[in-house]
Structure formats: structure tokens, C-alpha cells
Image: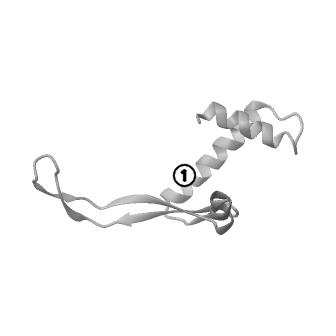
């Protein structure tokens, strides 16, 4: 699903509760939510959204690895990784 399809679907769902929503308004809210999630996870802040789950960034320490093509030993530098843990209610919806 691309951005345009997401905006169209969100607009249809939101129109049931709010009349006369323009695509531009939906896009502005969508962009704000995405920016909010990005800023919080980049700043290493835990972000819990009810009925969806928890976003957080984790630091993965430096480690040794092997290049599969050359079998050469390499050092994989420390980096951040995004972690998402779905909420209990979201997990239950997925398993139905």
C-alpha cells in the first residue's frame, strides 16, 4: 500500500466521524503523525500508542561477523535498530 492509498483509506474511515475532510487535511495529519513517531524514536524515546503497540529504538552493540562472500572476519559497527512490539489487543486481532 503506498501513501496515496493510505490517505484514501484513512479519509474514508475518518469521514464516518468527521464530515467534509479534504485530502489535504488528511495528508497533513498523516504527515504530522509520521513525523511525531520518527522524532520520538530518533530521540530514543519510547512511544506507546494504545491499541497499536510500542515503538522504540535500541542500540545494537558492535560485534564481529563474517563476510559471506569472502569469509573475511569483519567488525559490524554499533548501530540503532527500530523495535515495534504490538499491543495485546492488536495481537489478538491478528490471530483471529
Which residue is the site of mark 1? 38
Whether 47 is drawn above or below 12: the answer is below
Find residue 9 and report its image quarter: top right
Place residue 55 in its image quadrant: bottom right
Q: Is residue 92 left or right of residue 77?
A: right
- Residue 44 sits above or below residue 29 on the image: below
Q: How is the image coloured?
A: one colour
How packed mark 1 is, by other alpha carbons closer than 10 Å (few <14, some 14-19, many 20 or more), is: some
Q: Is residue 51 left or right of residue 75?
A: right
Image location of residue 81, percent across then percent down: 41, 58
- Pick whichever, 70 or 44, lies toward us: 70
Residue closest to the eye, 12 or 32: 12
- Number of numbered discs visible in the structure rendering: 1
Residue at figure coordinates x 84%, y 39% from the top left:
15
Q: Secondary structure at mark 1?
A: helix
Horizontal and vertical percent position of residue 91: 62, 63
Farthest front residue in view: 96
Q: Position of residue 18 (x, y in %)?
A: 87, 42
Task: Please state if 46 lies on the left or on the right of 14 as rendered.
Answer: left
Q: Nearer the viewer, residue 45 or 60?
A: 60
Q: Locate residue 8 relative to residue 95 in the image: left or right.
A: right
Placement of the N terminus among the 4 image quadrants:
top right
Task: Give the residue drawn at x 49%, y 64%.
Answer: 44
Q: Quadrant of the C terminus?
A: bottom right
Question: Residue placed at 10% from the left, 54% from the top?
Answer: 72
Amino acid at each position: 500500500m503506498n501513501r496515496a492509498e493510505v490517505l484514501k483509506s484513512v479519509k474514508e474511515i475518518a469521514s464516518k466521524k468527521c464530515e467534509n475532510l479534504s485530502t489535504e487535511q488528511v495528508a497533513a495529519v498523516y504527515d504530522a503523525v509520521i513525523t511525531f513517531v520518527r522524532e520520538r524514536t530518533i530521540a530514543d524515546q519510547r512511544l506507546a500508542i494504545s491499541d497499536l503497540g510500542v515503538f522504540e529504538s535500541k542500540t545494537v552493540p558492535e560485534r564481529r561477523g563474517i563476510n559471506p562472500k569472502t569469509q573475511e572476519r569483519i567488525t559490524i559497527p554499533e548501530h540503532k535498530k527500530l523495535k515495534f512490539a504490538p499491543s495485546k489487543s492488536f495481537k489478538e486481532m491478528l490471530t483471529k
